[in-house]
Image (spheres, helix red, strand yellow):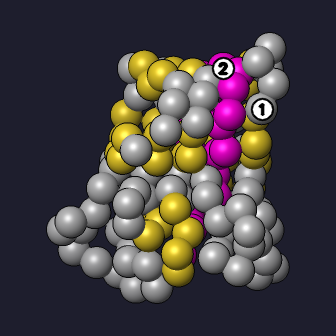
Amino acid sequence: ILRRGTTPSNLRIMMVGASNAWVSGFTLSNGYVTAADNYAIGAGLYLLSGWVENCRIVGNNAPGNGVAGGVWMAGGVLAASEVLYNSGWIPANGIYMTGGLISRCRIAAGDTDRHGKPTTGEGRRRLRIG
């Protein structure tokens, strides 16, 4: 399990950017990125290339103008993983994808708005392909 501690700070849990990288079997939890951070995307996972499989990406948050509390991906493969209950501002709270491949994954919506306040889930996007 990889998780941010309780100290309030911007911290993405993992970035995968090498084409030969392979990540398997981790839980990525409690990541937090905000608009104050120049990289306020992908609080749980920032995937540029490589392979991520059999992972749980759960409970990450990108409030304010952050995008994709769970996963921001521009390339690589996300396979056989769960992306659950992450929060982020529109356009996506689970996964924001501009490239790459998603295969055999379970994706469930987050539960907060752009200010971290609970919502009913209406209008929230689990996956956005942009």
Residue 98, compared with residue 88, is above or below; it is: above
Q: Quick check: can you spot residue 116?
A: no
Q: In the image, 77: left or right of 47?
A: left
Question: At 61% from the left edge and 53% from the top edge, which residue is drawn?
Answer: 42
Q: Residues within 10 Å of mark 1 (few under 14, many from 20)?
A: some
Q: Which residues are magenta?
A: 43-63
Q: Residues within 10 Å of mark 2 (few under 14, many from 20)?
A: many
Confirm whether the magenta stretch covers residue 60.
yes
How far apart are the two marked residues, 2 and 1, measured between alpha carbons? 10 Å
Q: Residue furthest left?
A: 122
Question: At 50% from the left edge and 56% from the top edge, which residue is drawn?
Answer: 68
Q: Amino acid at mark 2?
A: Trp
Q: Residue furthest top?
A: 20
Residue beneath label 1, please?
17
Residue 119 placement (x, y as % from top left): 28, 78
Residue 16 placement (x, y as % from top left): 75, 34
Residue beneath label 2, please?
51
